[in-house]
Amino acid sequence: MSVRIGSFELKSRVYVPPMAGVTDIVFRNIVRQVDPNCLLSTEMVSSRGLMYRKECHIMDLAPDEHPIGIQIFGHEPDVMAQAAQMAEARGADFVDINMGCPVPKITKGKDGCALMREPELAREIISTIKSAINIPVTVKFRLGWDDSSRNAVEFGEMVEAAGASLVTVHGRTRAQLYSGKADWSFIAKVKKALSIPVFGNGDVFEAEDAARLLEVTGCDGVAVARGTLGNPWLIPRITRFLDDGIMTEAPDDIDRITVAFKHCLGLVQYKGLRIGTSESRRHMTHYTKGISGGAVFRNRLTQISSVEDAMNILADLAEHVQGPSGRQRFLLAVENAYLEYCKHPGKGAGDRKDSIKTPVDVHAVAPVAVP
Ligand SMILES: Cc1cc2nc3c(=O)[nH]c(=O)nc-3n(C[C@H](O)[C@H](O)[C@H](O)COP(=O)(O)O)c2cc1C
């Protein structure tokens, strides 16, 4: 069964939802290379911040990444509507409103999940945005503020009535942050109550998890966030498993190491040396997790200060995994990566002074515990 957001039809039931500090143009390019159809989103963008810094690179989209949404957060209906217009002008296929972020820095200003306690204001935000743009509006929220106020069903009904075309529901409350388990049975209640498509979200780390989430919730699609860290291949594996029941092979260690390098190279080219190397340390740790005997190399990766550092450590790791032929295979892929990145149209901000920062303190948001 196909899923529609407004008038456009999705070719995939899998969504990589917004992750601050992760779903930037470089990460999305890597996901797109392995899965042409999944739904993508930018990191969240501050609507208020956009009023002062209109060029906002977080909203940069590459031509080959559609379908993609831009996620905005804030609580002032007019400001949110202006931000949504800017997102539309940047070429987004839809605007997603963040009503689920649990981080105190965001919620204390009535943004993110705080809006689940202000359904009237949330309704006004959605309908104001809806009448300001021509592309669909989607909303991402949680089960509620805390266990004593799980209002996701009523909230979802309000969101639908206000004009949203799709919702993504993370099966935790704000109070849980990322602890405990996502409650898929509660997501099922939201799905049952709504007519618009519902994407279920929370704790999908394997293709089988995605199938089970869809079975338990009856949702139209699945949003997979932390499971993609260092593992973009999870998305095509889920797609294939859902479509054909086939579990495709996981990439081998040298492929993982190669993509770790490409990610680092892309980040440094796009965000500049300081931010690029700093952000890529975390990503490379994820890519190389699970490689036998890899801990010592991962430790070295956390200290890199250049792309060359990353290349040398990853070459050592490739040799550790597969001997001299592993090193050679990796170094060949490095050469190709340089050629590829030099050509890519969405890249090339290089060492600019206004290096791109993610919208919030990534370490505050990042519950990056992947089992
Ligand atoms: C590092 C990180 C950053 C996140 N940033 C955002 C964000 O900007 N907007 C948002 O709606 N959700 C954000 N989330 C929440 C995820 O989109 C998702 O709802 C949550 O991680 C649960 O899904 P998962 O179990 O598949 O990871 C973030 C999650 C992580 C781990």
Image (tube, helix red, strand yellow):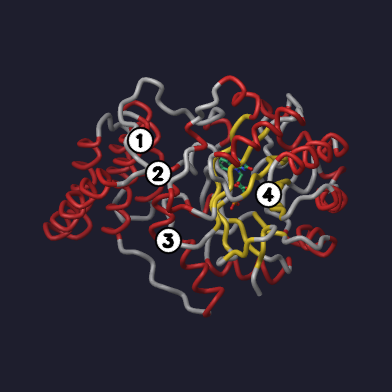
Structural distance between the alpha carbons of marks 3 and 2: 15 Å
> Circle 3 is placed at which residue position?
233
Position of 224 compared to 329: left or right? right
> Circle 4 is placed at which residue position?
180
Q: Nearer the viewer, mark 3 or mark 4?
A: 3
Helix or strand or loop: what does disc 1 sit on?
A: helix
Residue drawn at (52%, 69%), measured in percent from left and top? 239
Position of 54 compared to 307: left or right? right
> Circle 2 is placed at which residue position?
26
Mark 1 CB near ligand 1 (8 Å cut): no
> Circle 1 is placed at which residue position?
270
Judge whether 2 appears above or below 345 on screen. Answer: below
Helix or strand or loop: what does disc 3 sit on?
A: loop
Circle 4: residue type: Gly
Q: Nearer the viewer, mark 1 or mark 4?
A: 1
Residues tagged 2 and 1 counted as in contact (Cβ below 8 A): yes
Judge whether 212 appears above or below 52 on screen. Answer: below
Residue 216 sits in which quadrant? bottom right
Q: Which of 29 and 287 is in front in this view?
A: 29
Nearer the N terminus, badge 2 or badge 1?
2
Neighbourhood count class around disc 2 (C-alpha, 10 Å): few under 14, some 14–19, many 20 upward: many
